[in-house]
Amino acid sequence: MYFPDNNNGSRIVITTRESDVAEYVAGSKSLHHVQLLNKSVSRDLLCRIVFGEEDCPDELQGVVAKIGSDCSGLPLAIHVIGGLLSMVERSRDVWENVSKDVKASIVESDEHFSNILYLSYNHLSIHLKPCFLYMGAFPEDYDIKGSRLKSLWIAEGFVKYNTDESLEDVVEDYLKALVERNLISVGGKQIDGKPMTYSIHDLLRDLCTRKANEEKFLNLKDSMRRVSVQSSYQMEDVNASPQLTSLARSFICTGQEIISPVFSMLRLVRVLDVIGMVFKEFPEEIFQLVNLRLLSFLLHFRFEELTYS
């Protein structure tokens, strides 16, 4: 009775990040899944927000395309950065300065935007929050295998045992819950259609790292309980703090071509995921890590070219 059908063309639109809420409200017939925008549509939407019916000036075409691309297809992000660009001088130098760090410009210019993303995090149950924050340990645009991610969560102690389900079933429910809330995305799929890899949107990853820093969950200069290394530069910081590194409980390496004798410092580590590191031979220091719950690594063999005279 509150929404009578008066045949006047009125419609009610309800938006939500939670798939189960949408299905409950709308059913399958009226449910529409909003997809991320491609680069071309992102650029066009940004131009429409900033210039309206006017054409984008030729000298700004390149920088507009880059800013639109850096929004990673998220309409809300494009709307926020478009509002910011509408208020600044239409000069290439000013816009290129914004394009240097689009994510930071979006977050800093619109508190409402951050509140929307924080709302999604705050509504997570206690057992899902650390699983979500853990995604901040991986680089931008990083696809992680579901089997690897589930093993890490279990080894970290995030997954609580349920007498009615196995740990594998429980952690599968955790992954499904984060996907249904649109906080992580399914990447590649197996032949049977089941998810194989997962990823996280750049702006949601930024939320992960901010919250992880607030809650002292990941890398910190004064606390290295969980250490994530993505480059040789970060590895140098780890090597420069042997006392803090010795207290680390988790060590995750996603970088390529990183070689370091860091294992001798990880005396208390329980989770060691170093698939990104290159080893010419098995590091025997691993045998000294008596607290290990999970070890993931690859042994890379290199064959040098032989020249015969």
Image (tube, rainbow, N blue to C red):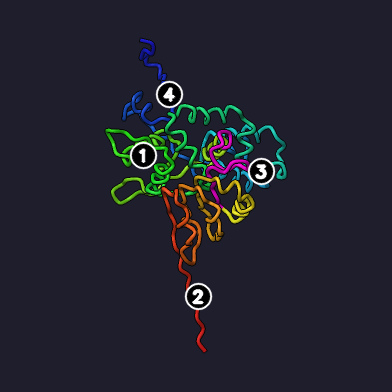
Residue 235, position in %: x, y? 59, 54
Dot 2 and dot 1 residues touching (CB under 8 Å): no
Q: Residue at x 49, y 31 (%)?
A: 121
| Earlier sequence position, callout 1 versus callout 4 | 4
Left or right: residue 103 compared with residue 185: right
Front one among 178 and 110: 178
Name the side, left or right, on which 182 lies relative to 23.
Answer: right
Whether residue 154 is visible, yes or no, is yes
Going from N to C along the chain, the mark reached first, 4 or 3, is 4
Hey, what amino acid is under mark 3? Pro
Q: Is residue 218 magenta?
A: yes
Q: Which mark is first along the chain, 1 or 3?
A: 3
Q: Nearer the viewer, mark 3 or mark 1?
A: 1
Distance Cα–Cα, label 1 vs label 4:
33 Å
Disc 2 from disc 1: Cα separation: 43 Å
The residue segment tinted magenta is 213-230
Residue at image position (49%, 59%) is 285
The residue tagged 2 is 304
Q: Position of residue 229 (x, y in %)?
A: 55, 50
Task: Tell me the crowding category of disc 4: few under 14, some 14 to 19, or many 20 or more residues within 10 angstroms, Cα based.
Answer: few
- Of marks 3 and 2, the one in the foreground: 2
Which residue has dot 1 on it?
171
Give coordinates of residue 210: x percent, y percent. 57, 36
Secondary structure at badge 1 equals helix
Q: State the CA–CA distance, disc 3 to disc 1.
A: 51 Å
